[in-house]
Amino acid sequence: ASFFRMQTIKRSSRVAAERASMETSVREWIFANMGISTSLDGLRDGVILCKLANKLKAGSVTGIDEHPSPFKAQENVSKFIAAARAMHVDPSLLPEPANVAVNPNPLALAQLLKTLDALTKLFPIAQGPAAAAAALPVPVTFKRKMEATLKAQKHYNAAVAKKREARALLRVQTQEKIAKHAREIRAAEQDVAAKKEQAKATGGFYAEPEPKVAFVIRLRGVNQLDPKSRKILQLLRLRQINNGVFVKLNKATSTMLKLVEPHVAYGYPNLKTIRELVYKRLYLKINKQRIPLNDNQQVSQLLGRFGITCVEDLIHEIAICGPNFTHAANAMWPFKLNSPRGGFVKKLTHFAEGGDAGNRAEYMSALIRRMM
């Protein structure tokens, strides 16, 4: 499937390059015939097209409306198409006038470009007065400006095509990574299930590995807060009520969480909750600023050197507590959550006693969903 995707990307890039080259040659041909530099959009009112037809064949178009409304522009384009048909342009190349002037669409503009390209082959050098005009010397400054404009446009088109190809390649790679991460998680779950079955069959039991990642939410403010707890909350980046962060569990962080248990709620969210939290509430820390997550390019620029190039990579790194967990967590601004739907039960009481504070283990996912 990846091979066919790459072939599609290459074909699209080739078509875009051919169209850019065709548009450049048509613009140069129009300039050589009429001394006018214009873009494809500048031809939609039909004025330049009608004048060009008269240059190529005198009297081809009569009654040109110089300042047309959309429907008058459609009449101008219709007259040009009739003139092009009279000049033996292939009818299959001719666009519908309304699709050029009134309701422009990319397909009609592409047909218009092909029509002009056919005229460049039928009239490689302007006839009559246009030939004399083209033979006149062009001012050096104007010629340099035109060459610089065409060169800049060429570079711009190449850069756009390159970026488009890079984005398409990144999309393909992202889809492959999503499938790879899903396979890894499924294999890990199957491995745990198999070990449980094996232990059950031998009369023993299997103890699952302890969680490696916790999500911590601050519940209380600064009133009656001792200095040590205040410092720990600062280290955890929990400076406001209902702020939340992902924390890697080890001896140091577990001790810190036990010390601030009366002031926070924490637990072990599942993969689905982590994904929803990232997609719905994530802001990135870019140049010390809080920037909303909009696309994979932001993640790639921020964490690409650690092999995290898309949002799914970021989610996977957090969920499995990968080797670059610290960099991934620090790239996230602390989550700003709402008060939970239905409210808290009692912040001052531990979860084990029917309150909200402290460790709520796998029940943390339910609280996070109520606060998103």
Image: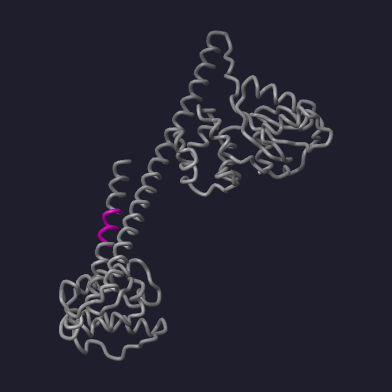
**Does the magenta portion include 306?**
no
Question: Which is nearer the eye, 289 or 300?
Answer: 289
Picture quarter with the C terminus = top right
**For residue 284, above or below residue 232:** below
How many marks do you count on the picture? Answer: 0
Question: Which is nearer the eye, 135 or 184?
Answer: 135
Q: Residue furthest front?
A: 140
Picture quarter with the N terminus = top left
**Residue occupying image coordinates x 71% and y 32%:** 233
Residue 124 in the image, given as x and y percentages of width and height: 15, 74
**Does the magenta portion include 17?**
yes
Q: Residue furthest right?
A: 224
Q: Is residue 237 left or right of residue 105?
A: right
Image quadrant assignment for residue 265: top right
**Residue occupying image coordinates x 60% and y 20%:** 210
**For residue 222, above or below residue 249:** below
**For residue 22, above or below residue 306:** below
Residue 132 in the image, given as x and y percentages of width and height: 17, 83
**Residue occupying image coordinates x 22% and y 84%:** 55
Q: Is residue 241 left or right of residue 115?
A: right
Residue 22 in the image, given as x and y percentages of width and height: 24, 65
Residue 32 in the image, given as x and y percentages of width and height: 22, 75
Extent of the magenta region: 13-19
